[in-house]
Amino acid sequence: MQALRLIQWGEPPALVRVERPVPHGSEVLLRVEAAGLCHSDLHLSEAPEGAFRYQLPFTLGHEVAGHVAALGSGAKAVAVGERVVLHGPWGCGACARCTAGMDNYCDRRSTLTWNGAGLGRDGGMAEYLLVPSSRHLVPIGDLAADQAAPLSDAGLTSYHAIAGLRQTLEAGSTAVVIGVGGLGHLAVQILRATAQSRILAVDIREEALALADRCGAHFSTVLHTDTGRALRAESGGVGADAVLDFAGTTESLELATSVLRPGGALALVGSGGGHLTVRKPGALPQGFSLSLPFWGSRTELAEVIALARSGAIHVETEQFPLSAATDAFERLRRGRVQGRAVLVPD
Ligand code: FEH
Ligand code: ZN
Ligand code: ZN
């Protein structure tokens, strides 16, 4: 089968032929219908030796949807032909967090040499994906695969980040979304569907503002020197109750903390590598709280899929055949993907 594999650190991934896996025991073999492309895949494709604990080679792709092609003799709770989406964070499988479906916060994460499918283990940028257990699968019914796949990472990460801000998102609150890309455009929709906040969106690209408006933002602006003042004005002058920073640069963090209301909460999601000084006394608002949410739980993934199946959220996607993966990576590297890029096996 065709698979996009990371073979050498610092070298781009290569599309190669490998054996189609055969499921044994509790394993489930998926026929991949769609695999989303994440900035983490970019980071991996450019990472030098030693940046990650992962063992090479492995197939990329941690945002995967498809249907069950075959079952190991001990596989449970899933049937051949069933359409499913992958819960991509794979932990140790035995700790309290993993047994609760919260592999994203596995207690033994520091002992593992992987984060999950396509992250140190073979992933779904391929025709088939071998999944260790059906506990990593969520049914999607008739939801299109190019919708379901991005929801398992971009959607789930945004949903989990918003869940951590829930206490600030009561009626009349203001939420700011910085970065309206693959995750941010879904965060706007999830906020519209699950909160009564006024949603303000910020991006560096004009074309992203149109996407933000389509997704339901009440106000959108391109980042400029006076953005903080504009956002504060849009919050009725008191500031934002919650900020979701999908950029994670020093500039975006400074903007976020400059517009937060006393008692406000910041979720730092983007891996821009920016830094924030937390000091008392200091410049941060009284009662400020910070979270660094990572991915989400299996239960939350089922909730995101249910939202999508109800029509409440829609993923903007750009489809590429798996054979054009290099183009997709390049487009993402240049910031030229509207919404989420999705690879479809040829
Ligand atoms: C996965 C593994 C490590 C860092 C970040 C990620 C995200 O792409 C998961 O959404
Ligand atoms: Zn990701
Ligand atoms: Zn665990």
Image (cartoon, helix red, strand yellow):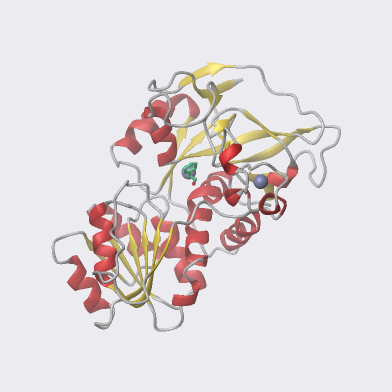
In what quadrant of the picture does the N terminus appear?
top right
Percent from the top left, x then y, of residue 141?
68, 52
Percent from the top left, x then y, of residue 210?
30, 59
Picture quarter containing residue 59? top right
**Res 112 seen here:** yes
| Residue displayed at 47% across by 53% down | 315
Picture quarter containing residue 299? bottom right
**Res 203 seen here:** no
Percent from the top left, x then y, of residue 22?
75, 24
Picture quarter containing residue 63? top right
**Extreme-left residue of the structure:** 225
Work out whether residue 344 or residue 92 is closer to the camera in this orientation and state it: 92
| Residue displayed at 72% across by 51% down | 99
| Residue displayed at 41% across by 23% down | 49
In what quadrant of the picture does the C terminus appear?
top right
Relative to 230, 143 lies left or right: right
Relative to 94, 276 lies left or right: left
| Residue displayed at 62% across by 34% down | 32
Work out whether residue 68 or residue 292 is closer to the camera in this orientation and state it: 292
